[in-house]
Image (cartoon, helix red, strand yellow):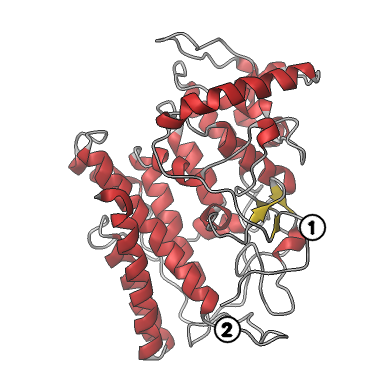
């Protein structure tokens, strides 16, 4: 298996020890972050950085108060280009205060939270089907994820935030804990998506040419920027519509991934390394499929935890709501595809039919797709069995990691 080494030190990622983020609830870390947030805000003001008036609103610092979204901010919901410009923090993150000013509120008046969700979706979404994300959109997604770190989202914002995570399903799904990943900026340009001579790409497999990527791994203590996608997904999982959006994105991602593998379940871009090592054509597919199973298992873990602690007071009602919002079933194509669609099209792929079986049995939903794919593509039984076992191990491990 590749160790991810590279001599290229430009762009979004490099080989070095990653900053670790320990598990724990979002609220438990809020107090520890507040002093850093205030210090960063002071630095922004001292530097003379102007926070646009369009993002100003009422103070919601007192208990029971709510943040009132001004009309100038509401206008961003109908102007995705202006929303991207407003939330793009720049390569040096000098403008990251704008995203905090807009989004860092746990209580928002009226329908303001839903409006914020539309702003986030518009600012970070590609401009249309088949269109790649721009660097500005990717940086805006980074700023949004960083801005809401460690807060409880106001009711109504979760679906819009979940659409952003789904829009960047590959970037949000990268394992940020591996020791060789060291982020070097909030976004990576399209050149970082190209495979190297050995067929390896740091940002992931089967990426669209010309697309920028949000690098959620990046942290910059000088401006207190440190997105935590896992914690964000945990927060979003309280909301049934957001849960359905995230679950759909992972299942769509599995279908997308499988249909690009070879008939042996291998990476078609793999090339024998210039220096012999332990790399194999199936090494990265194994890792990526385990990661998908891990994320689905984690979603189901959050669902169980929230039911147990009564955050979800009626689990049956929650599950019915999830099913209403779920788009359907996703199935891989019957033959290997060599297309490299833009990332936003992965989660938006058409459904193959209505949802079947127990929606909350994530393992069954994953394995049904894998088994059908293996049978239709004639994947050797030994290889298909190994793939299934690895996904099974990862799914169960995710369920048990914090559940007991």
Residue 384's disc is none
Q: Position of residue 55 (x, y in %)?
A: 65, 20
Please state if 53 lies on the left or on the right of 320 as rendered. right
| Residue at (66% x, 35% y) in the render | 221
* Residue at which label 1 appears: 10
The residue closer to the viewer here, 127 or 83, is 83
* Helix, strand or loop under label 2: loop
| Residue at (45% x, 73% y) in the render | 332
10 Å crowding of disc 2: few (<14), some (14-19), many (20+)? few
The residue closer to the viewer here, 83 or 366, is 366
Q: Do the residues under discs 2 and 1 have CB atoms within 8 angstroms? A: no
| Residue at (45% x, 55% y) in the render | 249
The residue closer to the viewer here, 403 or 76, is 403
Q: Position of residue 169 (x, y in %)?
A: 53, 55
Residue 246, compared with residue 69, is above or below; it is below
Residue 282 appears in view? yes
Q: Position of residue 298 (x, y in %)?
A: 36, 53
| Residue at (45% x, 63% y) in the render | 291
Residue 213, compared with residue 95, is above or below; it is below
Residue 47, compared with residue 280, is above or below; it is above
Q: Measure how far apart labels 2 and 1 are at the Cα level.
A: 26 Å
Q: Specify the quadrant that holds the N terminus.
A: bottom right
Query: What residue occupies the far front of the structure in this picture?
Result: 17
Please state if 61 lies on the left or on the right of 339 as rendered. left
Q: Position of residue 396 (x, y in %)?
A: 30, 63
Please state if 274 lies on the left or on the right of 203 as rendered. right
* Residue at which label 2 appears: 278
* Residue 239 location, quadrant: top left
* Helix, strand or loop under label 1: loop
* Residue 43 location, quadrant: top right
Q: Earlier in the sequence, mark 2 or mark 1?
A: 1
Of the residues tagged 2 and 1, which is closer to the observer? 2
């Amino acid at each position: 298996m590749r160790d991810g080494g590279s001599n290229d030190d430009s762009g979004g990622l490099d080989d070095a020890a990653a900053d670790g983020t320990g598990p724990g609830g979002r609220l438990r870390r809020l107090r520890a972050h507040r002093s850093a947030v205030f210090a960063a805000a002071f630095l922004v003001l001292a530097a003379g950085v102007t926070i646009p008036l369009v993002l100003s609103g009422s103070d919601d610092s007192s208990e029971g108060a709510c943040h009132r979204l001004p009309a100038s901010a509401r206008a961003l919901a109908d102007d995705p280009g202006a929303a991207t410009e407003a939330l793009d923090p720049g390569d040096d993150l000098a403008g990251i205060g704008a995203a905090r000013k807009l989004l860092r509120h746990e209580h928002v008046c009226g329908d303001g939270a839903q409006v914020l969700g539309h702003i986030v979706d518009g600012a970070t979404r590609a401009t249309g089907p088949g269109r790649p994300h721009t660097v500005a959109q990717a940086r805006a997604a980074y700023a949004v994820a960083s801005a809401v770190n460690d807060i409880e989202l106001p009711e109504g914002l979760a679906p819009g935030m979940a659409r952003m995570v789904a829009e960047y399903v590959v970037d949000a799904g990268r394992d940020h804990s591996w020791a060789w990943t060291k982020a070097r900026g909030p976004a990576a340009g399209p050149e970082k998506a190209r495979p190297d001579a050995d067929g390896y790409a740091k940002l992931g497999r089967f990426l669209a040419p010309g697309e920028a990527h949000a690098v959620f791994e990046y942290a910059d203590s000088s401006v207190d920027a440190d997105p935590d996608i896992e914690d964000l997904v945990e927060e979003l999982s309280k909301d049934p519509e957001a849960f359905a959006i995230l679950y759909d994105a992972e299942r769509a991602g599995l279908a997308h991934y499988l249909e690009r593998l070879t008939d042996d379940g291998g990476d078609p871009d793999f090339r024998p390394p210039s220096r012999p090592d332990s790399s194999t054509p199936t090494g990265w597919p194994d890792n990526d499929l385990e990661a998908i199973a891990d994320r689905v298992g984690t979603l189901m873990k959050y669902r169980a935890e929230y039911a147990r602690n009564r955050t979800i007071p009626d689990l049956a009602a929650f599950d019915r709501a999830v099913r209403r919002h779920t788009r359907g079933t996703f199935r891989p194509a019957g033959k290997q595809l060599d297309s490299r669609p833009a990332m936003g099209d992965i989660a938006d792929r058409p459904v193959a039919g209505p949802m079947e079986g127990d929606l909350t049995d994530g393992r069954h939903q994953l394995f049904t797709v894998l088994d059908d794919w293996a049978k239709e593509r004639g994947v050797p039984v030994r290889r298909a069995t190994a793939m299934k076992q690895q996904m099974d191990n990862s799914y169960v491990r995710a369920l048990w990691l914090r559940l007991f």
